[in-house]
Image: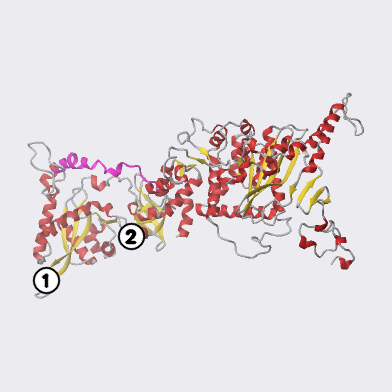
Amino acid sequence: MLASAGIPMKKWASNSVEVLEDIPPEDRSIQPWHDLQDPQSVSTLGLIWEPITDIFRFKVLAVTKAKLFMQRLWTLKSSDNERYDWDQPLPSKLQQEWKEFHSTIDLLREVRIPRFASIAGAVSIELHFFADASDKAYGTCCYVRAQSAQEVSVKLLVSKSKVSPLAVRHTIARLELCAAHLSMQLYKKVASSLRVVPPAFFWSDSTTVIQWLRSSPGRWKTFVANRVSQIHSSTPIDKWNHVAGSDNPADDISRGLDPAELLNKARWWNGPSWLKSPPELWPIGALPTKETVEVSHECRKIPIVAMTAIQSTFHEDLFSKYSSFSKLRRMVAWWLRYLQALRERAIVRHSKAISPGIPKGSNEPCNPLNSDELLSAERILCKLAQLESFQEERNDLVVRTSVSKSSPLKWLKPYVDVFGLIRVGGRLDNADLSESTKHPIVLSGKHPLASMLAVHYHKTLLHAGSQLMLSTVRQKYWILGGRNLIRRTYHQCITCFRSKPQLIRQTIADLPASRVTPTRPFSVCGVDYCGPFYVKSAIRKRGPTKVYVAIFICFSTRSVHIELVSDLTTAAFVAALRRLIARRGKVTELHSDNATTFKGASHAMHRVYRMLKQNDVDRNQIFSWCANNEIRWRFIPPRAPHFGGLWEAAVKSAKTHLLKEIGNTSLAYEDMLTLLAQVEMCLNSRPLTPLSSEPSDLEALTPGHFLQTQRHLQRIWARWYPEYLQQLQSRAAQGCKSPSKIEIGRLVVVKDDCLPPPQWPLGRIVKVHPGKDGIVRVVTLKTSSSDNVVRPVARIALLPISSDHSDAHVEHN
């Protein structure tokens, strides 16, 4: 193509005979192969190549000593304290030193470097970068380790050196970090020149540099932090390892070699001897135990408050953005993959060819996250949490491998692993367990990550109890205060709470005035139904008839009056109430539950009273007493039988006698009336108080005493005060507890006797009804099926969530 344009190509050279077969001899750079007697070479830009042997030769290779010599010239000053000019002769001592160095440069002609750094048939290739520094210079060198089925080859690929700056004198540790930073730059250059980048390993003989790299850049001063951050962004930190100084070939760069030394320096040309051994024999492991003072000197000196303000912004946003550990871990894993893709793109940006594994412009779907990526994300999250919770402990472990005596970790024998995570040292090294179980990761129970992990394991274990959760979590994490955290997580779980709600048990209220004030029997009373029972029909061959029993109980004397009711209609109950008034006297206040029969009766009574009030004047004189003494009817809250404990107890006692006596038989109507009268007698004969220990007191106070004649009235009521009333002073066990705080807007679970607990409906408190003592025992609720539902607090359970999150929870449900 070029020849057609009048530009013929000349000086062809190759190490392959087949390539030169079709090249005319006059266009070749070397003679034909069969005519060659001595090795011929091709030179360009100072690089000499011998095609026959396929090796490189250099005019000058060991440049470090020459650089150091030139640096000394820049600092040289004359007798009048001025710098030497370019045309001034050097002092005799420097002249002699340069002549000795120059006289040995000819030896560099003997240096032979293979052009092909690998071997034929290699099945694996690795790059190994070594870095070292001295007070005069620092540098790095890269070796290609190629392995085939028969051999392992290690050859020098490239090196780079720099002299130490004169303007600023750095410590050896900082210069070692500069050498590591130079290794990173050399790695990027080598990677950009390769089609496929092989795995890379990095070596330094500075323990300080390795510790800097294994910590967060934010810990260090600006000089160290900038370089550590750049190394983190361009190289895998887990591939940085420590190597002994005697095995570090980069030591030859930092100190320089004479040409005579360079020719026979096997460590320089082929790396350390152990590099040809299997990876199991490489010196990869824990750092030497000696203390490194440079580490603590480079710690960032800023106030703790300021550091918290700087670091907590990102961390708080990260951990508060997601409430689920799984989502947070996957999000971090995706970001890590994205960062890795950016690094790979930066490496191949200037390459001529793009890696086959990442085709340019590919629209293939993204692969799902694998277990290694999720594990890396989990480690990063734990490391961030430890940086927030155990910053001082981490510093102590890096400097002196132990924590202070005041640290909460002092009993755990903690250590920092290769990933920079604080783990429990413990005493289980000899146990047949996995490493994560023997040395779990340390976390603080107060950190949000620990809370998310507790919720994660709680759901993963199908809402397990506290003991199973704790034992499972400790197989991988050791959470300080973990037992309390896990218990709190269990008790705050909405699903677990709804499967077994804790209903409110409020403090028992004071007894109403009607219970502690002497009044005429049945002036204030309560009523309830029991049954059904069956009585024989008066007509032969007709089945038994269903009847009910209405039980009235006096509030002050606990006297019982029993009436037989033919059905559950309002008329039947009004008739029973009239019989009560006829036999026991006028009822001024009647209490009952919210059953439909009683509501209807209440409305019927009011219609009667309205009718009496609206009649003629003549009739008003007859019924004036009834109209002026209207019976007040009070209902207890719906589904709150404990509010009517007085008549519920009477019903229970009456049913006990009736069921034992009747069984499965049916009585005649008159027999039923007789039995009810006998039961009424039994209930009114029960002692209100225990028998006294006085020998002369042979009779106990019973409700029947209050139903006797008037002549005994004063004596009976005199006993009512000291004997019966005083025993009502004490409360039940729950009455001594602090009252529960019930507020408008709280989300509650409403008990439904017809449904299992997980299906109980949710409701919101819209109104509270406190008693005279200020304690709320009745509330009005808004549910999905009704806007105003009155329930006692004993029928609701407060959800263990704050009011701020209740709206979102209702919407979710």
Graded by Cα atoms within 10 Å as few (under 14), some (14 to 19) or many (20 or more), the crowding at tag 2 reads few
Which of these two is toward me, 700 or 608? 700
**Dominant secondary structure (helix, strand or loop) of the stretch shown in magenta:** helix
Q: Report if residue 229 is visible in the image.
A: yes
Q: Quadrant of residue 7?
A: bottom right
Element type at mark 2: loop
The amino acid type, in three-letter code, at marker 2 is Pro
Q: Which mark is residue 537?
A: 1
Q: Nearer the viewer, mark 2 or mark 1?
A: 2
Q: Which mark is residue 756?
A: 2
Where residue 702 appears, as percent x and y from the top left, is 13, 47
| Residue 768: percent from left, percent from top | 39, 51
Judging depth in this view, the residue of 579 and 294 nearest the camera is: 294
Is 6 contained in the magenta span?
A: no
Quadrant of residue 358 in the image? bottom right
Question: Who comes first in sequence, dot 2 or dot 1?
Answer: 1
Q: Residue at 22% of width from left, 51% of height from top?
A: 646
Q: Quick check: 443 above or below 646?
A: above
Residue range (magenta) = 716-741
Q: Is residue 293 left or right of residue 712?
A: right
